[in-house]
Image (cartoon, rainbow, N blue to C red):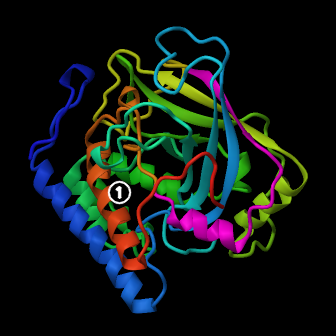
Amino acid sequence: MTPHIHPEQGEVIWPNEEALTARIVAMVQKTIRDRHFSDGRPAQRDVHLKAHGCVRAEFRVEAKLPPKLAQGVFVPGAVYGAWIRFSNGTGNRPDRRGDARGMAIKLVGVPGEKILATEKDAGTQDFLLINNPTFFADDPARYAAFIARGAHKNALIAATAPLTLGWKGFWVAFNIVTRSIASPLETRYWSTVPYSLGLEVVKYSARPCVVGSSTIPSNPGADYLREAMVRSLDVQELCFDFLVQLRAEKMQVEDVCTEWREEEAPFVKVATITIPKQVFDTLSRRVFSENLSFTPWHSLPGHRPLGGVNRVRRAVYEAASVLRHQLNGIDVREPGELSGG
């Protein structure tokens, strides 16, 4: 079935997109099954399976916004509860190794019918971000080759050969896997891929409100990023500015390996994310976190994900979540008003 696209916003169908998407889904499902049955642990995510912490937060929209930004959840003055899961991108590798770092935001108490037919009445809106402004693959064939070469088996660096991702994708991946951070709470994150915002095309970013002072320990433990979060949230609240970047002329929806330069398309603040002091490193919160599912398609139509990468993610994330929950004997369910955890 050919995906529905919005050519007026710059979307195009990739060659063999449907077949390649099905291949990627099958490989991801096999990874989840193989890992689950080989080590006897509960079924885990295929990527971003190592969480540093899942925290309660507040998402407060600016009191005044220009009309073209006041779309979807960005209702001036609106306040939402949120769950935010910080994670490593690849396997259970030690935190000291370079990797993508994820910030998955789930707003709760969001009214309106959502895109996914199976969750149209869910009261949630997701924003998925990583600590890099670009993605490493914008062609489904390269995406499939990346996964086939073992990207989901703690071998991200092995899959960055130029023949797999092309030179542009190679440099994006190399930049990601050679970078370490001091704290997930002091790191900037980007959506990497575009979304609609009403009639506009945008990308998102979350930037710490203040510059952090943490440093990487001289002898970092395998879980030092979780430990850094525990120390910070034990004594203070922290915040992020949530930003929107309106596409400038000639910026491509389907080219997610090329950065939208801020000097050409400045980011504008639309909301503040406040993470209060809290104790989050508990067994119940970890279980709650692992049962959550995140996808950019947990969304109001006004924030519709755009482009081929997002179309692949729709199929992959849904299939992976359903399989993971089935193997664990748990229903797929979106959280309510900060219930659980």
Comparing 235 with 264, the one in front is 235
Secondary element at tag 1: helix
Point out the stretch of residues depicted in magenta.
267-293
Left or right side of 255 for 99: right
Q: Position of residue 145 (x, y in %)?
A: 24, 63
Q: Horizontally, is 145 left or right of 244 in the view?
A: left
Using the rendered view, name the quadrant where residue 329 is placed: bottom left
Q: Is residue 341 magenta?
A: no
Q: Residue at x 26, y 44 (%)?
A: 311
Horizontal and vertical percent for residue 112? 42, 30
Res 304 quadrant in image = top left
Q: Along the line of sight, which residue is nearer the eye, 227 or 143?
A: 227
- Judge whether 4 appears above or below 275 on screen: above
Residue found at x 22% / y 30%: 11
Q: Residue at x 37, y 33 (%)?
A: 113
Residue hosting label 1: 317
Check the image and report above or below for 16 versus 32: above
